[in-house]
């Protein structure tokens, strides 16, 4: 992750072409979703605060400088520094700000555990919405079409055969089609109902298995 994140940040900074820079930012957003320790809140408007933070990251990535010996940890600290205040704004706006419940983080062996920190499936929607919008904005680009075609065809069945135990219907092929290729994309809650799986099961599978697999596919196409 350290090398991938460093490379993605460098590519974003070096890209002078608008289309190429947008593609690099898309790649960076996918990596960010895999970072442990991002703040979250149970507030109903949290996705708005999270989306605003992602937009801020895209606009200010050239200003990011690691503050620790870990690029990924520095990135989390940098993101949380902005996101924390956007979350605070949510509670101030409805006069219910409480610093003890606005955000939380869980630590394990001095490392923050994202699965414990982000337990609400709705959190995935904000980043998914951003990724989907970026992908759709570049639909006519060759790389976007290549990834979409790979997802649709899944010739090697890599996506179809990757699913939670006892839930073959909740495979990455199905999820990628419904979350990334549908226009508009299906809601996570609706997909969970249709597939008769728990929201958290679907979300965890998407995050832990599908996103890394899609990243491998993207890398292979780029190379």
Image: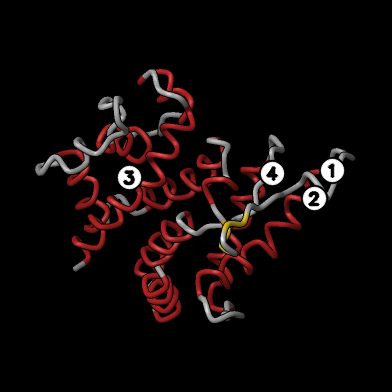
Which corner quadrant of the image does residue 90 belong to?
Answer: top right
Front label number (3 vs 1): 3
Front label number (4 vs 1): 4
Q: Which callout, 4 or 1, points at the residue further toward the start of the chain? A: 4
What is the quadrant of the C terminus in the image?
Answer: bottom left
Q: Residue 89 carries which label?
A: 2
Q: Mark 4: which secondary structure?
A: loop
Q: Which callout, 2 or 4, points at the residue further toward the start of the chain? A: 4
Residue 159 vertical placement versus 20 (above, below):
above
Rounded to the nearest angstrom, the CA distance separating label 4 from label 3 is: 24 Å
Residue 21 vertical placement versus 169 (above, below):
below
Which corner quadrant of the image does residue 56 belong to?
Answer: bottom right
Give the labeled residue for mark 3: 210
| Image coordinates for residue 104, horizontal then vertical, percent | 70, 50
Q: Which callout, 2 or 3, points at the residue further toward the start of the chain? A: 2
Give the labeled residue for mark 4: 41
Residue 102 vertical placement versus 170 (above, below):
below
What is the quadrant of the N terminus in the image?
Answer: bottom left
Give the labeled residue for mark 1: 93
**Camera-side residue of 21 and 206:** 206
Tags 4 and 1 in contact by the CB under 8 Å rule? no
| Image coordinates for residue 100, horizontal then vertical, percent | 81, 48
Q: Characterize the local packing of mark 2: few (<14), some (14-19) or many (20 or more) Cα atoms within 10 angstroms.
A: some
């Amino acid at each position: 992750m350290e090398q991938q994140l460093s490379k993605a940040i460098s590519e974003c900074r070096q890209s002078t072409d608008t289309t190429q820079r947008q593609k690099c930012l898309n790649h960076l957003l996918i990596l960010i979703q895999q970072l442990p320790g991002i703040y979250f809140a149970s507030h109903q408007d949290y996705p708005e605060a999270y989306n605003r933070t992602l937009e801020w990251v895209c606009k200010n990535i050239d200003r990011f400088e690691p503050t620790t010996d870990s690029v990924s940890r520095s990135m989390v600290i940098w993101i949380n520094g902005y996101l924390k205040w956007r979350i605070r704004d949510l509670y101030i706006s409805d006069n219910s700000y409480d610093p003890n419940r606005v955000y939380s983080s869980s630590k394990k062996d001095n490392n923050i555990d994202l699965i414990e920190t982000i337990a609400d499936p709705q959190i995935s929607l904000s980043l998914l919405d951003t990724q989907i919008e970026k992908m759709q904005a570049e639909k006519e680009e060759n790389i976007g079409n290549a990834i979409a075609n790979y997802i649709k065809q899944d010739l090697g069945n890599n996506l179809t055969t990757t699913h939670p135990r006892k839930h073959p219907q909740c495979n990455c092929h199905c999820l990628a089609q419904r979350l990334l290729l549908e226009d508009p994309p299906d809601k996570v809650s609706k997909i969970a109902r249709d597939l008769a799986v728990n929201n958290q099961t679907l979300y965890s599978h998407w995050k832990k298995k599908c996103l890394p697999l899609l990243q491998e596919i993207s890398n292979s196409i780029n190379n």
